[in-house]
Image (cartoon, grey):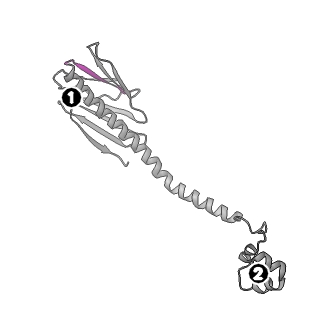
């Protein structure tokens, strides 16, 4: 004779009542094969609301860090773009033995590499999410608006210049380029 919860309740209801104090009420019903009542199934509304509230608090605490991270990332990306364009300009001037001009449009953040040699393709990048705040070319007044031009000669030498990039939070990166095209950066602000 096999004894299962269902058979015990059908065959001997007194035995199932006798086992009730020994077992938790919910586990007794489930082990005896009876379905859970609707008020016992799932999570209560308070439990669900508590979990949602805890998740909302965690997101609210972490959100400012995410925003600062994205802003800092935009500034870093723009600085890397500018360093890459500067190195590319110097390399192409030496490789193609052609004078190149690197232009900075402070109004729209566009950086162009233009050559007098028509066989070289023009090169253009837009710095997005940050602004070109200032371009200071050696021997000229610093520019805060308009277009700045730096010439790269065929021997790889350029006019030393400093470009300042800024984001909306006031963080800045200042990139200094010497006559041989090597770049040094310095970060200002809170980041």
Residue 66, horizontal then vertical, whole percent: 47, 49
Which is nearer the eye, 48 or 68?
Answer: 48
Q: CA distance from mark 2 to mark 1?
A: 101 Å
Quick check: can you spot residue 35? yes
CA neighbours of label 1 inside 10 A, class few (<14), some (14 to 19), many (20+): some
What residue did someone put label 2 on? 1
Residues tagged 2 and 1 counted as in contact (Cβ below 8 A) = no
The residue sitting at the top extreme is: 118
Q: Quadrant of residue 106?
A: top left
Q: Is residue 41 magenta?
A: no
Quick check: can you spot residue 169? no
What residue did someone put label 1 on? 138
Kindly state the secondary structure of the residue where label 1 is placed.
loop
Residue 23, horizontal then vertical, whole percent: 71, 82
Would you say the magenta stretch is mainly helix, strand or loop?
Answer: strand
Closer to the chain start, of discs 2 and 1, is 2
Give the left or right position of residue 21, taking residue 191 as reference: right
Q: Quadrant of residue 185?
A: top left
The N terminus lies in quadrant: bottom right
Give the left or right position of residue 55, taking residue 149 as reference: right
Kindly state the secondary structure of the residue where label 2 is placed.
loop
Give the left or right position of residue 85, taking residue 27 as reference: left
Residue 149, horizontal then vertical, whole percent: 28, 23
Instruction: Identify which residue is drawn at 32% across, 40% down.
Output: 173
What segment is highlighted magenta in the picture?
97-106
Instruction: Identify which residue is drawn at 53% across, 58% down.
Output: 58
Which is nearer the eye, 169 or 179?
Answer: 179
Q: Quadrant of residue 178?
A: top left
Instruction: Identify which residue is drawn at 54% across, 55% down.
Output: 60
Camera-side mark, 2 or 1:
2
């Amino acid at each position: 004779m096999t004894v299962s919860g269902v058979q015990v309740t059908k065959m001997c209801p007194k035995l199932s009542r006798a086992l009730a104090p020994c077992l938790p009420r919910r586990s007794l019903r489930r082990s005896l094969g009876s379905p859970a009542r609707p008020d016992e199934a799932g999570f209560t509304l308070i439990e669900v609301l508590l979990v949602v509230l805890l998740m909302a608090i965690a997101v609210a605490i972490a959100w400012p860090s995410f925003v600062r991270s994205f802003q800092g990332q935009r500034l870093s990306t723009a600085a890397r773009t500018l360093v890459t364009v500067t190195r590319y300009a110097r390399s192409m001037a030496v490789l193609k033995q052609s004078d190149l001009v690197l232009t900075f449009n402070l109004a729209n953040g566009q950086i162009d590499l233009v050559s007098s040699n028509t066989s070289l393709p023009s090169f253009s990048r837009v710095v997005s999410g940050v602004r070109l705040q200032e371009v200071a070319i050696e021997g000229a007044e610093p520019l805060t608006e308009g277009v700045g031009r730096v010439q790269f000669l065929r021997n790889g030498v350029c006019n030393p210049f400093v470009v300042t990039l800024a984001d909306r939070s006031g963080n800045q990166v200042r990139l200094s380029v010497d006559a041989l095209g090597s770049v040094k950066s310095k970060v200002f602000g809170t980041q």
